[in-house]
Every structure is written in structure tokens, then in C-alpha cells.
């Protein structure tokens, strides 16, 4: 075997299977090692070991190894000397090597085995990939997926993936990319010298690197040499213009979208029959034969959206589960925008739905229309990497350790390989493996205050400016709700907007109008001014610039600036201490609170402002305000007076200074509001977490209805709001009322359309309210819930999704359920032990599992098929009444009357919306069947509202003795039970 494989000169690919992930308590049950010398496999080791206790079901299912297979095997460690002798002199290669190193210190430590992490290497070579897991890399490399996690299979997979990646680098002639990696990962003077020597033929890379450098750098040197030795045809690159959008998102044949018309230009309407030609029976989407089936409710919704876009106005659509609402609004949006040159923006709330629109729904619609429209994803400016700032922030300094150089190398590789510079796509694995990446991200992001615009040497390759240009050329834009409420003037006009997941709009609008001073804000400011992990910050650059003027006042001015920052940080620390003292009486969690979701909070009422502990906080905010003003004055006035030609001579530094001044101005504005008299309609609150040294003081709007209805919605020519849950019942449009769009004010109400579900919910599902369950916050509930979850899962062989209002309660129930079910071969998964999407995918594929989750699993988790036959809900997900914003909003609704009035108008309907979302996790297709168990029947005083929220389902309120019989009978009739005697 030649080529890339020969780069592995003396490498052993190593993999382990263990009883778990914690080397302190778990044990090795299988070890595999494949030895490659100059590209050829020369030896193979694969050994099984017996653990001290039975294998967990998770491991049995993952590997196919069972206790019988391990019976009589030796314990791991009995052949340690033999393994050390075998590995001595070899470079170990492992995918996510810290795992192997954690379990093998006694094997690898004594022989000082060099270790190469293939996962880290692949991040440098292909940072643009969405996942670097071995499964994902196998798909990328065109290899067959693994049937089971076994050591030899995994070693072969790692080898195959690496060879494929290295071959691609050589074939594409990526010597320049590899050289940049080397000069960042290795101390710069040595790296540059070695590359120069190699290019001059004075020293071979192999000789220069093997004895001194780590295995990663040594392999990269060999790869660099191989890339240089391979002739690569010249490629013509387009000059001028911005980075192009992805070809599959553009109009067919490179056609241009019509120019945006002038205001008042007549609209060419989208006719009903045109929508039907796409979504109707026998239409273009059905003809694609990609599983699409026309649905009457979807077509009705789509035609309503087409009329709204064509005629203007507002439309609200409550689209029940299974309607297919995304295509229902995308189809008319595409037709309208392509015809009129008027862009339509689609704004979901969650990234999950945003990804679905851009990766699944729009590509399908694009194919169905023959590429008749273009579409683009557009985010806020700070989501994009700035090339100029990134190249500066990722420079390495002498003495930097690998932990600091690695994230810089990764960011530089991302800069070279990413097509869009989207910082959201930075690897979570790399963030966890090298935490300093978190601190570098703010230094590399694009900002309005720091951009050089056309003066920047990277202007036409700027990710941000290119994204804006692509958006201007597109017909349909996918954005998110947060961006919609903070739309920059540089972006295309936002006159036609679809807000999906509209039940989240009140919270998004609240966040848009929230002000907060916090420890994190001052931490970010300090990093910006003083630098990050060894890199000099803005102050170091300013000091050099001031000294270079040779003016006597320069050095003194910089000392004033440093002193002002020191004074500001001292005032901020003092404020944090005072806020913590103020919040201590509120630190006890409420019985309904979820300690993982809510930090101790204190509502700053008139009574609190009159109390002795408030005066120091008020004084502290004023001290911070004055310190912010002084530092802002020094940077925005005095420094610029001392450096009058800064914008001409050092434009990049001038923009960084402007960015810092802008951040200081924002913080000063926050402090001024918080230090002044309280504003009507604002909720003021303080939070503190002493153990983490976290604190905040902030203000939020109590009522966003005027802002949403008048300042936002009224500015749109056409606005569509849609969600599966706009209301808590047939006559209760709660979401529209909270947004000021219910018609009760001078703003007319949108047209309301309710699109019925195509599913037969009364036949496909049974919802049971258990009337005699213990209250969820009481101690007996944990045992009660564990027994019910275990019994239902045992009857179905798994297939249960548990939704909990409290993380702590979920964890306690999970441990009890695990003890009962895993001996029966049913695996128990929980949200806190994995990534949400991967857990949901496992539940969908494998009926023999139970999945337990908290708030984020109540909505947006889609598990169609036999993966879920039962949804268990612990309680109505009511927010804690002591949360400052909740208390303020309910108080405003009571108008001096009963507190219960505020509860039924705010907390209760919000909980019912989330309950509807949770119940909706059960039926996701026509074939789905199952039951929902709600262990909280609701107080009799609002039981009617709860039943209204579940309208459309078959609902019964029963004590557990009757509910148990009913549930098991339904499960048997639905064919969801398993034979308890089957092997």
C-alpha cells in the first residue's frame, strides 16, 4: 500500500471497550491494537477481559459483548508487561485519545508512548465538517457503517478514515494549509526554520521532527512534504464580488432575482391554483417521489399564507401536529418572492427547526420548482468570523503551550476551510477538549464597531459582508426570531415575515428589551482590553502606538487608562459582593423550581429599595457607572486626541478601539438605567450564585404587547405567525393576546386559521390524568413515578419518553428506573447523559429503550415510529411564582385583585402551552399509536382549562388502580405490548 498510508511509518491504532466512561470506577473489557509499519499492517492484537461486575446493558447493546463471552477471561492488567513490550517504540493512534489515555496510564505511562489523537487531527484537516465522530467520518469517507463497537472494527475504521483524509490533502495539494498548521502548532521560530530548511533541501522533515516533536506535528510534517511532492493543476479563482452562495441554493442557471421594487409598486399575487400545483394531489412535490403526500389542511394553510403575502396584512395559523406547516408557508413564500422581488424572511425560534428548513424543506421545494427561487441563511453579524481579527487573534506567542496553540490552529484551519464562517459551527468536541477556544471566539467575531468595511484587505472575502450580499440576491431568507427583533439597517428590507414557533415570540421580545449588568460582562470587557491566555490585548497595542508618537504625555495617558480600568474592575467586584449579600435571603429554591434552570433571584420591588441592603447596591451601581464613563472618556476622546492619525496609519487598531468604546458605551447605558429611578413597566431583579462567583442586576419589560404589535408587527406589509400551540383551547388565543394581537386594542387582530391535524388523535392516542398520584415535589413521588414508568416500559419492552419539570426529580426517578429495567434488558437514557439529537435518534431506532428528559425535550423532539409508545409527564410545567418576571406579570394582571386571577391568565396558560407540546411528542405520523400518562390532573378549579388544552385527544381522569388496567388494555389493543416470557 502506497501514498498516504505510508505516512504511518511506525504507528499502532489502539481502541478500548470498557464498562463505562469513568476510568476511576469502570474497567477495560476489550483491547485492540493494529500495528502499521510504512503503510503495511504487521501485527494485530485483540483481547477480552473479565470485569469485576456484570456488564451494564448500555455496553451490551453497544458492543454485542455479554457476560457469557467474558466468563473465564483474565482481568485487565494481567498481561501488562507483554502489552508494554508490544507498544514500546510505536506511536499510538486513537480516536478521542484522552479516553484511552485515561484508562491506560499504567500501560502508556512507563513506556512514554507518544499518542496521536485522530479526532484532533481531523479537526485541523477538515474543520468545516459538522461532526468528527467516527460514525460521521466513516460516512464522509464513503465507508460502510460499523455493525457494532468492537476494537478491531474501530481500529480499522480509524485507519481508513485517516488514510482517506490524508489522501485528499495530498491530492488537492494542501501544502499551504499544512504549513500554516505547523507554524501555529509548533513554536514559530523552529517551525519556520524547519520548513525553510526542507524547502532548501538542507534537512528532511522526518529527521527534523521525529526526535523532538510530538506525533501530531511529526505526521503533519510528513504530510506537508507529500503535498509538496505532488503536482497539482492550477485552478482559476473568481476575482471581484463577494463569496458566492452555495450552488444548490441559487436560482437555476445562475438567474438573478428581480431587483427589490420601490415602495408602492403593485404586487403580482400568488393564485390558489399555483400553490395547489406544488402542494396539492399530483403536484410537483408529490411527483418528486420523496415521500411527500398532499394534505388538505396543509394546502388550506398555504393558500391562506399566499393571500396574506399577496394582499398584505396579518395571519395567525395554529397548525396542529402533522399539518406540515413549514412547507405550507415556504411554498407560497418562494412563489411570491421570486415573482415580485420582495424577499420573504422565515424566522423560527430553535436552531433545530432552522436547520430543518435550510437542510431539508427548502432543498426539497427548490427541486420541486426546478430551482425557480433562491434561498439563503442569514444570521446576526457577531455570528460570523472576521478574517482580519481572526488572523491577529490566532497569532502564537513564544512559550505558549499546546493547550493555547491548538485552538488557534483550529480557528485558522476553520478560516481557510469554512464556506460561510458561521461560528455556531465550531466543534463542541474541540470546545470541551481545549476550553481556551471559548475565550478566543469573542476576539475573532465580526462586529459592527470593528469592521473596516471596504478599507479591509479581506473585504470581498469577508464572511459577514458576503452573507449580506447572498441575502440580497436570495428570494427566501431563513433567519431566527432574535435577529428579526434586532434587524440591522444594512440588511435587506424585512417587509414580509413568517414567525414560526410563534408561542416563543413573547420570550424573544422580552430578551430583546432586557438590560443586564453582570460579572460576565466585565469579564468579557477585561479580555478585550487586556488579552486572552497570553495574547496581548487592545491596551498593549495602544501603549505601543502612544510610545511611538514620542510624546511625553503618551506614557502618562496609558497609565491613566490602566488605572481607570483597574478602578472599574474594583467597583464591579464590590458591586458583585453587594448583590450577593442582597440576594442571600432569596437563595432557597421554591418547591416547584428547577434548580438547574433558575438561579436564586430577587425581585427588586419598592420594598426592597427601601430596605438597608439595597443602599450599598444602589451606590455600587452608581460607582460602576462613573467608572465606565471615565474609561469611556479616556478611550473615545483622550486617546484619539493623542493619536489624531490613528484611522489612517493603523485603521485596524482604530476599529478595535472603536469596538471597545462601543462596548463601554453600552455598559454605561445599562448602568445609567439601573442607577436611576425605576421605570414604569419594567421588572428589576438581581441574581447571585456565590459558589460560581456569578451575579447580575437587570431590567426586563413586564408587558411587550405594545412593542410587538405597534413597533414591530405594524411595520410589516405582511406578517404570518404560526405554531402548533397558539392557544390553550378552542376559544383561548393566549399567544396573540400576550402579543397585543388579539383585537382588544386599536391594533386589529390577525385573521386566525386553525389547521386541523390529519391524524386521528382520538383513535391513535389515549391521555390519562392520574387523580391520586403524590404531588411531584413530595418525597413519595419519586418511588411512585419510578414504579409506573418501569411497569409501562416493561409491558412495552421500552418505548417510553418521560418528560419532567425538574432536572433533579428526573435524575432521581432515572436511577430508580434504571435499577428495575436494566436487568430486564431495557436501557434507560437521560438528557443529562448525552446530546439531545443523538438520544432522540437512538430512541427512534431502538424500541428497547426509555428516554427521560426535561424542559427542552417537551418541544422540538421528533421521534416518529415505534420508538415511543408512551409519554409520561410528571406534572403541569408551571414556572415558579417567585421568579421576578413571573411575579411582576401576574401582579400586573391582578390589578389589585386576587392573585389567582394572575395565575390563570399567565402561568397556567403558559404551562398548558408547554403541556400541549409535550403531549404532542407521542403522535408524529399516521402509524403512531400510544398513551400519555400525566401524573398531575390539575386542581379542580382549573381542570376545565386543562381539558380544553387537550381538546382533540381522548382524555380520561382516573385513579391509578383504574388507570393501570385501562392503560394496559389500550396498549394490548394497539399491539404495543411484548410477551413477558419471550427470551
Image (spheres, helix red, strand yellow):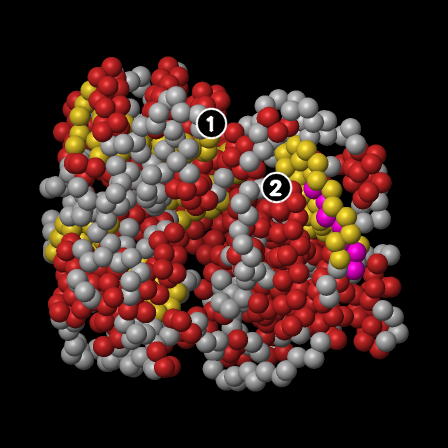
* Label 1 residue SS: loop
- From the top left corner, tell me how far across and down residue 26 is, in percent: 64, 29
Displayed quadrant of residue 341: bottom left
- From the top left corner, tell me how far across and down residue 697 is, in percent: 44, 41
* Label 2 residue SS: loop
| Residue farthest right in this picture | 202
Q: In this image, 493 relative to 818: left or right? A: left
Which residue in the structure is indicated by mark 1? 825
- From the top left corner, tell me how far across and down residue 118 is, in percent: 66, 53
In this view, 632 is above or below 233: above
In this view, 645 is above or below 845: below
Q: Is residue 172 visible?
A: yes
For residue 150, the mark is: 2
Q: How many marks?
A: 2
* Placement of the C terminus among the 4 image quadrants: top left
Viewer-proximal residue among 736 and 638: 736
**Magenta part of the chain:** 32-38
Viewer-proximal residue among 208 and 842: 842
Q: Is residue 634 magenta?
A: no
- Residue at x 31%, y 51% (from the top left corner): 509
Viewer-proximal residue among 811 and 765: 765
Amino acid at each position: 500500500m502506497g501514498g498516504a498510508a505510508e505516512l504511518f511509518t511506525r504507528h499502532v491504532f489502539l481502541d478500548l471497550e470498557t464498562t463505562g466512561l469513568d476510568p476511576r470506577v469502570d474497567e477495560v473489557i476489550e483491547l485492540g491494537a493494529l500495528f502499521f509499519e510504512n503503510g503495511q499492517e504487521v501485527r494485530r492484537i485483540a483481547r477480552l477481559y473479565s470485569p469485576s461486575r456484570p456488564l451494564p446493558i448500555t455496553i451490551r447493546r453497544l458492543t454485542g459483548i455479554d457476560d457469557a463471552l467474558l466468563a473465564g477471561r483474565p482481568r485487565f492488567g494481567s498481561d501488562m508487561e507483554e502489552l508494554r513490550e508490544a507498544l514500546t517504540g510505536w506511536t499510538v493512534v486513537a480516536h478521542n485519545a484522552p479516553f484511552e489515555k485515561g484508562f491506560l496510564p499504567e500501560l502508556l505511562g512507563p513506556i512514554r508512548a507518544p499518542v496521536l489523537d485522530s479526532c484532533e487531527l481531523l479537526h485541523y484537516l477538515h474543520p468545516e465538517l459538522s461532526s468528527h465522530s467516527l460514525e460521521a467520518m466513516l460516512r464522509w469517507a464513503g465507508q460502510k457503517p460499523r455493525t457494532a463497537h468492537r476494537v478491531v472494527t474501530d481500529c480499522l475504521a480509524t485507519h481508513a478514515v485517516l488514510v482517506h483524509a490524508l489522501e485528499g490533502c495530498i491530492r488537492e495539494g494542501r501544502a499551504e494549509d499544512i504549513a500554516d498548521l505547523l507554524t501555529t502548532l509548533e513554536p514559530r521560530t523552529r517551525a519556520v526554520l524547519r520548513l525553510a530548511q526542507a524547502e532548501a533541501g538542507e534537512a528532511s522533515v522526518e529527521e527534523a521532527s521525529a526526535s523532538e516533536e510530538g506525533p501530531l506535528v511529526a505526521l503533519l510534517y510528513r504530510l506537508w512534504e507529500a503535498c509538496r511532492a505532488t503536482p497539482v493543476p492550477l485552478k482559476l479563482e473568481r476575482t471581484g464580488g463577494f463569496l458566492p452562495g452555495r450552488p444548490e441554493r441559487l436560482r437555476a442557471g445562475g438567474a438573478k432575482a428581480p431587483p427589490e421594487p420601490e415602495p408602492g409598486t403593485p404586487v403580482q399575487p400568488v393564485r390558489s391554483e399555483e400553490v395547489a400545483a406544488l402542494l396539492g394531489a399530483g403536484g410537483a412535490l408529490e411527483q418528486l417521489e420523496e415521500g411527500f403526500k398532499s394534505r388538505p389542511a396543509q394546502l388550506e394553510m398555504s393558500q391562506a399564507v399566499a393571500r396574506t403575502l399577496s394582499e398584505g396584512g396579518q395571519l395567525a395559523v395554529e397548525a396542529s401536529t402533522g399539518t406540515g406547516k413549514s412547507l405550507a408557508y415556504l411554498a407560497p413564500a418562494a412563489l411570491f418572492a421570486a415573482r415580485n422581488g420582495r424577499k420573504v424572511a422565515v424566522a423560527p425560534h430553535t436552531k433545530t427547526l432552522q436547520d430543518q428548513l435550510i437542510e431539508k424543506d427548502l432543498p426539497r421545494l427548490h427541486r420541486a420548482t426546478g430551482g425557480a427561487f433562491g434561498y439563503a441563511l442569514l444570521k446576526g453579524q457577531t455570528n460570523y468570523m472576521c478574517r482580519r481579527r481572526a488572523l491577529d487573534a490566532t497569532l502564537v506567542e513564544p512559550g505558549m503551550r499546546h493547550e493555547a496553540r491548538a485552538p488557534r490552529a483550529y480557528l485558522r484551519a476553520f478560516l481557510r476551510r469554512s464556506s460561510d464562517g458561521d461560528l455556531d459551527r465550531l466543534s463542541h468536541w474541540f470546545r470541551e477538549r481545549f476550553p481556551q477556544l471559548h475565550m478566543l471566539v469573542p476576539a475573532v467575531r465580526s462586529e459592527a464597531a470593528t469592521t473596516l468595511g471596504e478599507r479591509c484587505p479581506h473585504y470581498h472575502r469577508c464572511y459577514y459582508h458576503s452573507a449580506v450580499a447572498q441575502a440580497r440576491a436570495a428570494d427566501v431568507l431563513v433567519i431566527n426570531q432574535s435577529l428579526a427583533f434586532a434587524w440591522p439597517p444594512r440588511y435587506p428590507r424585512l417587509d414580509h415575515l413568517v414567525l414560526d414557533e410563534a408561542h416563543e415570540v413573547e420570550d424573544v421580545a422580552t430578551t430583546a428589551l432586557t438590560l443586564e449588568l453582570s460579572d460576565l460582562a466585565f469579564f468579557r470587557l477585561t479580555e478585550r482590553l487586556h488579552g486572552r491566555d497570553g495574547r496581548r490585548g487592545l491596551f498593549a497595542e495602544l501603549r505601543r502606538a502612544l510610545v511611538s508618537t514620542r510624546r511625553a504625555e503618551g506614557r502618562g495617558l496609558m497609565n491613566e487608562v490602566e488605572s481607570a480600568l483597574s478602578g472599574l474592575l474594583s467597583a464591579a467586584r464590590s458591586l458583585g459582593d453587594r448583590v450577593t449579600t442582597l440576594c442571600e435571603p432569596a437563595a432557597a429554591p421554591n418547591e416547584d423550581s428547577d434548580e438547574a434552570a433558575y438561579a436564586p433571584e430577587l425581585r427588586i420591588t419598592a420594598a426592597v429599595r427601601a430596605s438597608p441592603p439595597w443602599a450599598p447596591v444602589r451606590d455600587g451601581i452608581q460607582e460602576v457607572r462613573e467608572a465606565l464613563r471615565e474609561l469611556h472618556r479616556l478611550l473615545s476622546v483622550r486617546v484619539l486626541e493623542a493619536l489624531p492619525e490613528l484611522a489612517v496609519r493603523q485603521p485596524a487598531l482604530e476599529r478595535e478601539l472603536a469596538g471597545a468604546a462601543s462596548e463601554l458605551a453600552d455598559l454605561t447605558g445599562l448602568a445609567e438605567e439601573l442607577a436611576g429611578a425605576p421605570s414604569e413597566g419594567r421588572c428589576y431583579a438581581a441574581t447571585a450564585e456565590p459558589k460560581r462567583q456569578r451575579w447580575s442586576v437587570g431590567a426586563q419589560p413586564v408587558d411587550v404587547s405594545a412593542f410587538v404589535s405597534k413597533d414591530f408587527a405594524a411595520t410589516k406589509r405582511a406578517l404570518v405567525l404560526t405554531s402548533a400551540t397558539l392557544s390553550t383551547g378552542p376559544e383561548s388565543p393566549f399567544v396573540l393576546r400576550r402579543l397585543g394581537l388579539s383585537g382588544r386594542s386599536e391594533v386589529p387582530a390577525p385573521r386566525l386559521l386553525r389547521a386541523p391535524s390529519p391524524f386521528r388523535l382520538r383513535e391513535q392516542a389515549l391521555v390519562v390524568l392520574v387523580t391520586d398520584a403524590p404531588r411531584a415535589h413530595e418525597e413519595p413521588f419519586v418511588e411512585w413515578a419510578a414504579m409506573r414508568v418501569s411497569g409501562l416500559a416493561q409491558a412495552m419492552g421500552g418505548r417510553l419518553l418521560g418528560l419532567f419539570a425538574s432536572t433533579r426529580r428526573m435524575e432521581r426517578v432515572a436511577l430508580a428506573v434504571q435499577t428495575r429495567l436494566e436487568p430486564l434488558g431495557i436501557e434507560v437514557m437521560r438528557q443529562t447523559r448525552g446530546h439531545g439529537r443523538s438520544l432522540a435518534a437512538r430512541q427512534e431506532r431502538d424500541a428497547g429503550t426509555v428516554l427521560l428528559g426535561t424542559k427542552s425535550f417537551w418541544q422540538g423532539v421528533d421521534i416518529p415510529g415505534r420508538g415511543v409508545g408512551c409519554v409520561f409527564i410528571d406534572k403541569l410545567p408551571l414556572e415558579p411564582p417567585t421568579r421576578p418576571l413571573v411575579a411582576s406579570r401576574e401582579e400586573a394582571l391582578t390589578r389589585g385583585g386576587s392573585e389567582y386571577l394572575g395565575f390563570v391568565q399567565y402561568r397556567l396558560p403558559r404551562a398548558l402551552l408547554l403541556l400541549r407540546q409535550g403531549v404532542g411528542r407521542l403522535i408524529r405520523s399516521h402509524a403512531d399509536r400510544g398513551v400519555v400518562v400525566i401524573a398531575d390532573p390539575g386542581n379542580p378549579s382549573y381542570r376545565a382549562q386543562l381539558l380544553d388544552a387537550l381538546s382533540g385527544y381522548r382524555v380520561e381522569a382516573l385513579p391509578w388502580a383504574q388507570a393501570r388496567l385501562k392503560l394496559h388494555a389500550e396498549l394490548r389493543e394497539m399491539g404495543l405490548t411484548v410477551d413477558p416470557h419471550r427470551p
